Amino acid sequence: MIRVNQLKLPIEHSEEMLRRQIIKTLHLKNEKDLIRYQIRKQSIDARRKNELSFVYTVDVELKQEGMILHKNKNSNISKAKDIHYHFPDSGEKQLSHRPVIVGSGPAGMFCAYELAKHGYCPIILERGSSVEERTAEVERFWKDGILNPKTNVQFGEGGAGTFSDGKLNTLVKDVAGRNREVLEIFVKMGAPEEILYINKPHIGTDILKTVVKNIRLEIERMGGTYCFFSQLTDITLNGKKDKVEAIRINREKEVATDVLVLAIGHSARDTFPMLQEAGLMMEAKAFAVGFRVEHPQAMIDACQYNGHKNALLPAASYKLTANLENHRGVYSFCMCPGGYVVNASSEEGMLAVNGMSYHARAGQNANSAIIISVRPDDFEGDGPLAGIEFQRKLEKNAYRIGNGAIPQQLYGDFKENRISTGYGAFESTTKGAHTFANLREIFPKELAASFQAGMELFPKYIPDYNRADAILSGVESRTSSPVRITRDESFESNIAGIYPCGEGAGYAGGIMSAAMDGLKVAEAIAGKYARLKID
């Protein structure tokens, strides 16, 4: 296969135009020499005001590839070098019991998928419900405000990412083909094929729910077992306290295991103290907190596409970052084009928000978390769990000032330290009740000032980003885990047989990096243990 980069075409183009451009670029005298092509990447070039283009990278199969490569000295034409994912051969150590995976978010789900595929018959424990039940429960919560602490936006099949934008981009370097493996599994399970090549792929919460269910059904078909409403509540170690022997579910049922994957997610706040008491080594880590900020999607589109309007253009996204003199970073996080601000709470008397988009991204507003970095020295008290209490304090403040509804404030009123009385030129798009309040009451003064300082810097990238009627919603506190459970090069914790995994354990930040970490842990387990023999 030959890889051709930088194929530019107008926004309105056909497949035949792309094919003709390939033939032209490769200087093919006979178009029948082109056997087939596959799109590897598609992005939008909007740098020039008078020109807007789709830019493609394609892999091309030709009849005489060697000769074509020899003749073409174009730096954008080269031999395709694909990285193919390889799962390791099974190890030799015998398992006495089935591996147990705690959590069915991206990390646990993809770890379970690969282990089930290769004959390890994992048991997947999920403290929440199946995605079908969970969806109904979350919709009820957004409608009537009555929280189910067992299954909600944070807890349940698919993890927190199920009710998000479903972004699939990552900054993790992929030298082993794990990124492609995850994307191909998603497509196999019902995600649109375009995620394999568009520059910033996303699935959307509406499609993601079906994909998550299909992955579960496939895992079960391959020998895995799902247990819903099954919370890890205790761990039993051997006499030396250095190896796992069993776990307890819901304080009642005991399950023997010699392999325990902790893919617990960043919101399993009641699980971390139990793990600490069991003897797992962990540490507090830096993370970030802030507000959801809404703007009209048309405003973002106009900026990012240089004023171009075309129905074929997707809702535009953005990425913003600033480094302040107080050594804090302020940056956008989990930007949701055409999305919604959602109540993402999981504990009584506390309130957290997140962003969510459907696949079409057809909502009127763009929203993004604008977050400020926080460090362990910001927390009250010491110890690895201090960051959790810091989050809880902010969420209690948010719940209090909104009386249980999402507290909102226009940015102009935030600067003037006053409660808003109405929206400006556009209204909020939210899932869940919302009310006006003074969001400055959520944060310590330095964090509120840092947020404002960042907002005042961002108009140099997106004009009028700090407009007075930009809508703020609080509090965005679940950006990443405030805890890291330590693990060694074999992915095991200080207790043998326990594998910290994914975002909750402190090793990922988003759907793709969590899924890829799940693959890494599955590989580590398979490389050590032989396939399970079940009578």
Image (cartoon, helix red, strand yellow):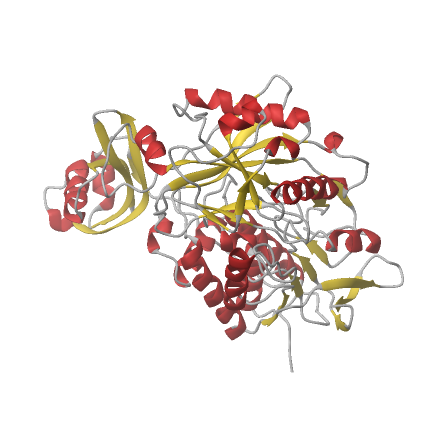
* Residue 440 visible at all: yes
Residue at the outermost bottom position: 535
Residue at the outermost front position: 421
Instruction: Answer with left or right where residue 213 lies relative to residue 103.
Output: left
Residue at the outermost right position: 239
Q: Is residue 162 above or below residue 314?
A: below
Q: Identify the image quadrant of the C terminus.
A: bottom right
Q: Quadrant of the rendered structure where residue 155 is?
A: bottom right
Q: Is residue 383 above or below residue 502?
A: above
Instruction: Answer with left or right where residue 361 lies relative to residue 492.
Output: left
Q: Position of residue 234 (x, y in %)?
A: 79, 63
Instruction: Answer with left or right where residue 45 lies relative to residue 219.
Output: left
Give the camera-side residue of 302 and 385: 302
Q: Quadrant of the rendered structure where residue 416 is?
A: top right
Give the camera-side residue of 522 and 485: 485
Q: Position of residue 398 (x, y in %)?
A: 63, 41
Residue at the outermost left position: 30
Q: Position of residue 147 (x, y in %)?
A: 61, 58
Q: Quadrant of the rendered structure where residue 419 is?
A: top right
| Residue found at x 28% / y 27% | 306
Give the camera-side residue of 367 and 32: 367
Q: Is residue 171 above or below residue 130?
A: above
Q: Is residue 289 above or below residue 429?
A: above
| Residue found at x 30% / y 36% | 44
* Residue 510 visible at all: no
